[in-house]
Image (cartoon, helix red, strand yellow):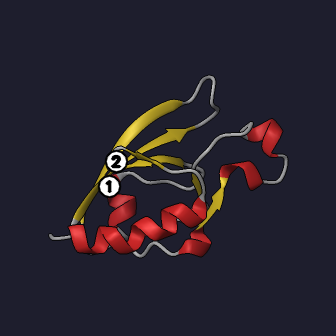
Amino acid sequence: MRLPQLYPHEFVAASHLPLAHDVLPMLPGAVVLQVDANSAAYEAGLRPGDVILEVNRTEIHDAREFAGFIKKLKKEGSAVLYLQRGPQESGEKLFVALDFTA
């Protein structure tokens, strides 16, 4: 699997969304703004609107912190993302595994 092209500008802190209190009230994490349909991230299940809450069991507080993890992930070869999809109350929480070595 090819290394997903994840760039810091593709994520925004959940608490900084327009109307954040109506959409995602004070959630920590990084919101995925876009995912290339031909990327490993898309194949693994990452979708626009997902909120990345943890990477390899480490809590993510905002998009800047997640961008820092991207550099480490390239060296480690894989990662497990814990994310929120949909509204906080009724949405689902999922794990997405990314393998950068294949």
Residue 9 seen in this snapshot: yes
Q: Which residue is mark 1?
A: 44
Q: Residues within 10 Å of mark 2 (few under 14, many from 20)?
A: some
Residue at 61% over, 44% down: 28
The spot of residue 37 in percent (x, y) is: 44, 67
Q: Quadrant of residue 5?
A: bottom left
Q: Is residue 36 left or right of residue 3?
A: right
Q: Is residue 11 left or right of residue 101?
A: right
The spot of residue 64 in percent (x, y) is: 58, 66
Q: Residue 67 or 85: which is nearer the viewer?
A: 67
Residue at 43% over, 54% down: 46
Q: Residue 92 or 59: which is nearer the viewer?
A: 59
SS of the residue at dot 2? strand
Task: Tell me the amino acid under the disc marked 2.
Answer: Val
Task: Tell me the amino acid under the disc marked 1.
Answer: Ala
Q: Is residue 12 above or below residue 96?
A: below
Task: Work out whether mark 2 precedes mark 1 in sequence or the reverse, and give the earlier one.
Answer: 1
